[in-house]
Image (cartoon, rainbow, N blue to C red):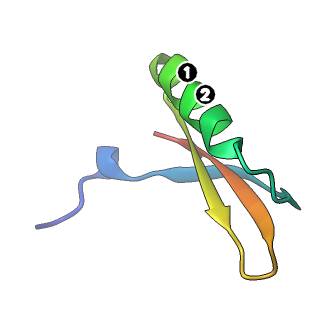
Amino acid sequence: MAEQESDRLELIASKHFQSYKEMYKVVDYLNKTLKHKKVMFGLNKNQDGTMTINIYEI
């Protein structure tokens, strides 16, 4: 199935920081409250113990 232009996520920003146990709750809150602004947040835990938050334009 071909990916449509509107289905792509464009990375706006990315930031690395020390791991925070409940950061996923913040990301979930941001995704729920800012969905209408056409942004989405992603969170990755890196192998070195840090975390990366990504902000995407939908």
| Residue behind mark 2 | 30
Amino acid found under the numbered disc labelled 1: Leu
Q: Position of residue 48 (x, y in %)?
A: 81, 81
Quarter of the figure that contains the C terminus: top left
Left or right placement of residue 49 versus residue 10 in this view: right
In three-dimensional space, the C-alpha distance between marks 2 and 1, rounded to whole angstroms, equals 6 Å
The answer to whether the residues at label 2 and label 1 have Cβ atoms under 8 Å apart is yes
| Residue behind mark 1 | 34
Compared to 32, does 24 lie above or below?
below
Q: Of discs 2 and 1, which sits in the foreground? A: 2
Q: Position of residue 9 (x, y in %)?
A: 46, 51
Pick the residue in front: 14 or 33: 33
Quarter of the figure that contains the N terminus: bottom left
Q: Which picture quadrant has residue 2? A: bottom left
Q: Position of residue 11 (x, y in %)?
A: 61, 53
Compared to 41, does 5 lie above or below?
below
Q: Residues within 10 Å of mark 2 (few under 14, many from 20)?
A: some
Amino acid found under the numbered disc labelled 2: Leu
